Image: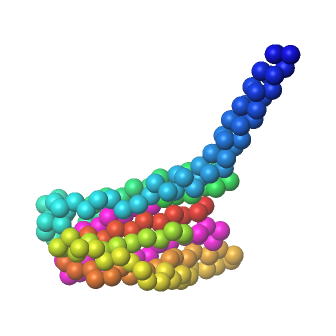
Amino acid sequence: MTTPRSFSISSAVTSLLLTALLILALLSPTLARAGVGFQPVVPEELKMTSEPQAAGAPAIILFRQVDRDDNGRTSHEDNYYRVKILTEEGRKQADVEIPFYKGNNVVGVHARTIRPDGSIAEFDGKVYEKTIAKARGLKYSAKTFTLPDVQVDSVIEYYYTLDL
């Protein structure tokens, strides 16, 4: 009788482990997306007033990261941008346009402006959608928004997920 009882406990543990693994597998796309977020404010980036390798540039990309998951069922791309505004003309970078094709979708847009003094203006405005081009069943659109309070020497950041 000892053998059937230990077999029963072993089956229960195995079932529990399989259930836990199944739940983890189902949640993994959600958990992976949870890792996207803003990077810490870097004082050296706020002090920067020019970039010798891009003399006269109105703005420069400080950091860009794209993480793509092509697993088929929940394929997506997490995008993160950090941009330094160097001149008055560079303030145009506050008007962000994220292009995408019909059948894809841009979700989870988060953005903020880091002012030259290090204070932060969070984006809490509306994200708009506009059509860029449309022909013969093809549609190319963009999500657009404007970051708040962008000044010369600000750093702007935004991230989003492109569902493929």
x, y percentage for residue 130? 53, 83
Magenta span of residues: 79-105
Examine the rendered structure and indicate whether residue 66 appears above or below residue 95.
Answer: above
In the displayed structure image, the side of residue 136 where residue 155 appears, left or right = left
In the displayed structure image, the side of residue 87 where residue 69 appears, left or right = right
Examine the rendered structure and indicate whether residue 133 appears above or below residue 26.
Answer: below
x, y percentage for residue 125? 43, 83
Q: Is residue 73 visible?
A: yes
Q: Nearer the viewer, residue 21 or 129?
A: 21
Q: Nearer the viewer, residue 17 or 143?
A: 17
Examine the rendered structure and indicate whether residue 47 appears above or below residue 125.
Answer: above
x, y percentage for residue 59? 24, 71
**Rendered-image quadrant of the C terminus:** bottom right
Residue that protrudes farthest toward the front in the picture: 1
**Rendered-image quadrant of the N terminus:** top right
Q: Is residue 81 magenta?
A: yes
Examine the rendered structure and indicate whether residue 21 appears above or below residue 141.
Answer: above
User: Image quadrant of residue 80?
Assistant: bottom left
In the displayed structure image, the side of residue 86 where residue 77 appears, left or right = right
- The residue at the point 51 percent across, 83 percent down is 128
- The residue at the point 63 percent across, 71 percent down is 102
